[in-house]
Amino acid sequence: MAYKRVTQADVAQRAGVSQTAVSQILGDTGNEANFRPETRQKVLQAAKELGYVPSVAARALRTNRTMTIGVILGFITDELSLRITRGIQDVAHERGYGILITDTEQSSALEAEALDQLRQREVDGLVFVDSWSDPDSLLESDRYPPMVFAQLRQSIQKRNCVGLDNFRGGYETTRHLLDLGYRKVAHISGPERWTSAVERVKGYKKALEDYELSYDLSLVEYCDWEVSSGREATTLLLDRHPDIDAIFASNDLMAAGSLQAAAQRGLRVPQDIALAGYDDRYLAEALLPPLTSYAIPLNQIGQKAAYLLIDRLLKKNARYVPSISVTGRVIVRSSCGAFSNGSPA
């Protein structure tokens, strides 16, 4: 049987009222209070029985809003991005918005295409989860609807952005290892072109400074966030400094590679070398030993980004809004030599 859309005329016929009454009771006109309670109840009951859903296109024509938010992801398979998107979705649904998700594969060219596609869909606003274009140039353009950036890989923008204090994350994770008594702490960083990685290195350096320890460039390796690069970096670090007693890896995937390299050397974690990661991915708790990691409040980032955007949409003249910085916390597990039943924020 072919699909047949239920119309307001169908609801009117079932309820035994005029189509005008149905339109005003089921629409966003604010006129439903003009009808008697029993009439409203008959219309609502008929709509429920027939499975009526409002036409988004009709509502958009009437209100000049589609009640839809576009979400542009760098990689749709990335766990961190998806957890942020879940936070966006939770708030969007709470506030009556739907979301459209598109993936750019970390390409600025594909990001431009996604922007045009979502603009054609007439979304009310946009949330970028790690934009690969210049946020300032996008914000200055009058071609696009209001937008907000949820940033993990790049620095927090001064406006329309929710992001992580990566300096603090790098500092607290390194400080945690130093507080446990480790003194030769190496660092496996992300790529130097990523500001989040650079900020974590700065936090690492500051923690060493506070403990009156010298920063040694030969104790730092810059990698590409992947398991294999963490494994290779750990091998290089141990070749140069066999007496390293702890490693802080700038993400959990590289920490997993570090764990593999230590095992290949016959080193026990944490008895011979301690290990801490960053992100608190789902795999952190599943590794053996479970991985101490700096937990990013990913859901919170998504929620705050959605609230920031929707507040902008409600304040129609507000082109820019102040950015929001969030902080995480160290989740202590066995890999660092200390124990806790802590769980991510």
Image (cartoon, helix red, strand yellow):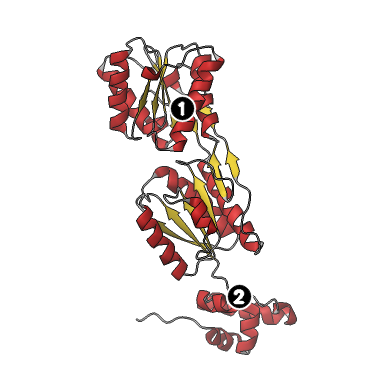
* Residue 56: percent from left, percent from top: 52, 74
In the picture, the quarter occupied by the C terminus is top right
Instruction: Tell me the crowding category of disc 2: few under 14, some 14 to 19, or many 20 or more residues within 10 angstroms, Cα based.
Output: few
Pointer 1 or 2: first along the chain: 2
* Residue 140: percent from left, percent from top: 54, 58
Pointer 1: what residue?
A: 201
Q: Residue at x 58, y 56 (%)?
A: 309
Count every numbered label the image shows and give the total. Answer: 2
* Residue 249: percent from left, percent from top: 40, 26
Q: Residue at x 44, y 50 (%)?
A: 131
Q: Residue furthest left?
A: 264
> Which of the 4 image quarters holds residue 246?
top left
Q: Nearer the viewer, residue 137 or 259?
A: 137
The image's mark for residue 229 is: none
Q: Gap between marks 1 and 2, in whole Å?
A: 49 Å
Q: Amino acid at mark 2?
A: Thr
Q: Secondary structure at mark 1?
A: helix
Q: Secondary structure at mark 2?
A: helix
Q: Nearer the viewer, residue 18 or 137?
A: 137
In this picture, is 163 found above or below 112? above
In this picture, is 337 found above or below 11? above
- Note whether residue 183 is visible: yes
Q: Residue at x 39, y 79 (%)?
A: 3
In the picture, the quarter occupied by the N terminus is bottom left
The image's mark for residue 63 is: 2
- Note whether residue 339 is visible: no
